[in-house]
Image (cartoon, rainbow, N blue to C red):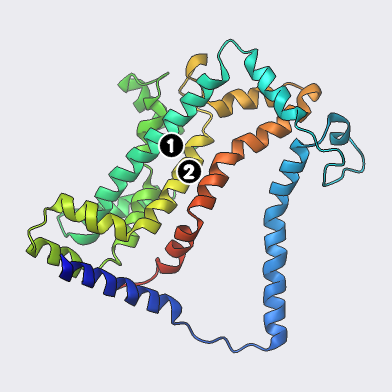
Amino acid sequence: MAKKNKEIKETKQQVHKKVLKRRKPNRSIWGDFFVYLFLVLVALAMVFPLVFAVNSALKPLDELFMFPPKLFAQNPTLDNFSDLFVTMGKSWVTFSRYAFNTVFITVVGTAGHLIICSMGAFVLAKYDFPGGKTFFNVVVVALMFNGYVTAIPNYLIINALGWVDTYWAIIVPAFAAPIGLFLMKQFMEGLPMSLIEAAQIDGASLWKIFITIVMPNVKPAWLTLIIFSVQSLWNNRAATFIYSEEKKTLVYALQQIQSGGIARTGQAAAVTVVVMIVPIITFILSESQTLETMASSGLKE
């Protein structure tokens, strides 16, 4: 085990050296200035929708219809959020039920997607078997198809399985999302096969190798995968497959409030903030690992 841990440490050091070893840019001071100016402008453009959404949710109703509109709230208030929860409380399905539906679908779908994609990627990346390359090519082709293109075939399959109006109509298709298998496979290819062979010589089983060696070393990849999966499932309205009100998702219920007309404009602004909170928090908690994925994805042994 000591030898194996030493090899893992040396491998990580080599990867970090490759990331840090970059060609020194040959730019003037003005070149650096314009590069940073461009990055600042892009950052402002990307953060503007977030700032606008938060300030809109904090504006009283009269400020929402003010012309010309102002970016920042003049008299910030939480009335929009309190009105939103009052409206949700008047529904015959409680807010907690909608929240449970969304959390259950998101957690189970993300966990299953991560487990299945990780195991499949490990086999495709580290072992040669008949049809392996063909299977991965099919996965790559599947990346080109938008969800709208596969909507009808998905519905026919789910209906044939009897899963319409159940949680599984949303959870099971999430297990097979091709982006997860592609991302994990590409990242695992950078993991040295010598680590796996050394563990096999020490008598470790494939399950132990996968859990204690492979997964910890590809942590940035599966954290990135979690972000993608959580964002997709949390924002899924599930209106195509789920018809019972007590099984509908929180996003669906909140969007119904948004369509309530002018009187609910403030609540609609609060809905936007509530819906985007979870994906943003998930990204913030795993930001550093996500950036490491982007930096290391092109490195090979």
The answer to which image quadrant residue 133 occupies is bottom left
Amino acid type, callout 1: Thr
CA–CA distance in space, label 2 to label 1: 7 Å
Q: Which image quadrant is residue 12 in? A: bottom left
Q: Decide if residue 279 is in sight here.
A: yes
Residue pictured at 49% horizontal, 85% vertical: 23
Pointer 2 local density, CA inside 10 Å: few below 14, some 14–19, many at least 20: few
Image quadrant for the C terminus? bottom left
Dot 1: within a 10 Å radius of its alpha carbon, few (fewer than 14), some, or many (20 or more) residues?
Answer: few
Q: Residue 249's spot in the image, x, y percent?
A: 52, 25
Could you tell me if residue 145 is visible in this image?
no
Quadrant (top left/top right/bottom left/bottom right) for the N terminus: bottom left
Residue 284 locus on image (x, y percent)? 54, 52
Location of residue 155 with respect to 202 vertically, above or below: above
**Amino acid under disc 2:** Asn
Closest to the observer: 219 or 260? 219
Q: Secondary structure at mark 1?
A: loop
User: Do the residues under discs 2 and 1 have CB atoms within 8 angstroms?
Assistant: yes
Q: Which mark is residue 150?
A: 1
- Residue 146 is marked as 2
Which residue is situated farthest in the top direction here?
92
Q: Which mark is residue 292?
A: none
The answer to whether residue 275 is above or below residue 51 is above
Q: Residue at x 31, y 22 (%)?
A: 161
Query: In the orientation shown, which residue stands out farthest toward the front?
Result: 2
> The residue tagged with tag 2: helix, strand or loop?
loop
Please name the residue shown 67% across and 89% down the image.
28
The picture places residue 26, in percent across and down from the top left corner, at 59, 89
Is 42 positioned to the left or the right of 240 in the image? right
**Residue 206 in picture, x, y percent from top left:** 14, 53
